Image (cartoon, rainbow, N blue to C red):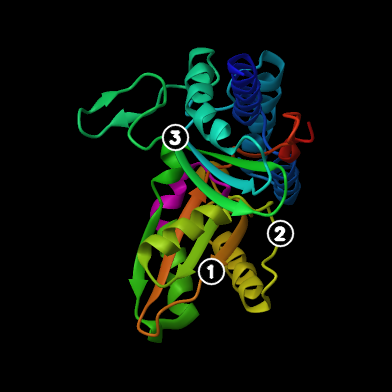
Amino acid sequence: MASASREVHGRLIEALKSFISIVSTRLPDDVLKALRKAYEAEVGGYARLVYQAVFKNLEIAIAKSVPLCQDTGVLEFFIELGRSFPFSIELLKAIGEAVAEATEEGFLRPNVVDPATERNTGNNLGPRIPWIETTLVSGDHADVYLYMAGGGSSRPGSARVLDPAQGLEGLLEYVVNTVVEYGIHACPPLVVGVGIGPTAEVAASLSKRALLRPVGLRSPIPRMAELEEKLERVLDELGIGPQGLGGKKTVLAVHVEYAGRHPATLAVGVSTSCWALRRGHLRIFPDLTYRVLSHGV
């Protein structure tokens, strides 16, 4: 029995390490497609040179199996556990060990600092980090979503509670002002996640989850889809462009997620990714085979 348990533990660690290494060294298929489309939209200036450097960077990262950006972020896991998946507890236990081993093997830079000691932990483990959120769903498999939250792209993150009288126009103004003030430092073109809800922490959480959606996939709710389109148009009109050097595309996409709100509050959260939106989707089956669905492997 102990031998079988060790085997399960070992296989889960290997699956998670492989997943982490892929997310660190390769962009998801949808993000790469969006970058190529943005490149084609540029007609001159420095923008095309920036994209050419980006694509060369990506080629080298894959060829050498090294992180595509030196800032590999702080790891955040969003997990959907099928109620019939037989290894839920084992999976949650394996995550920290997989992160530490991936760090030791060079796929992650040690980024976690303990606020109580102001010391880097050296292995990307720390108080409540890696961050793990779990949701129970129907099914017999586990879906693991990973987001590498880099420092530069996380700095524009913000949330506040607006007066409901400000409406969606006030929300739009808040998002645009946030990108104007901080977006240039987050290595655009950006994917902007917007959360709407009753409180600041709910809106902030939803804005991060918005970054997990495939780039450009519209909200199924018409009014939210219209808001996404309007925000994309307004943000692109800023002309910030790739790396802040000017261009037609400042954002690859804007995604809005929302929850019901209180009659007296309209909370908005903003999260951004840099051009290197390093996130992935791993599916683990009950026989412990797996697929990285975000990267076609």
Across and down, in percent, residue 181 comes to: 38, 56
Q: Which mark is residue 217?
A: 2
Q: Which mark is residue 258?
A: 1
Q: Look at the image and tell me whether residue 108 can be seen.
A: no
Residue 228 vertical position relative to residue 215 in the rendered view, above or below: below
Across and down, in percent, residue 166 comes to: 40, 82
Q: Assign a secondary structure to mark 1.
A: strand
Find the distance from the CA under tag 3 to the CA under tag 2: 27 Å
Image quadrant where one finds the N terminus: top right
Across and down, in percent, residue 56 comes to: 68, 26
Image quadrant where one finds the C terminus: top right
Q: Assign a secondary structure to mark 3.
A: loop
- The answer to which of marks 2 and 1 sits earlier in the sequence is 2
- The answer to which of marks 1 and 3 sits earlier in the sequence is 3
Instruction: Give the farthest residue toward the left.
Output: 117
Find the distance from the CA under tag 2 to the CA under tag 1: 15 Å
Residue type at numbered disc 1: Tyr
Residue 57 vertical position relative to residue 27 in the rendered view, above or below: above
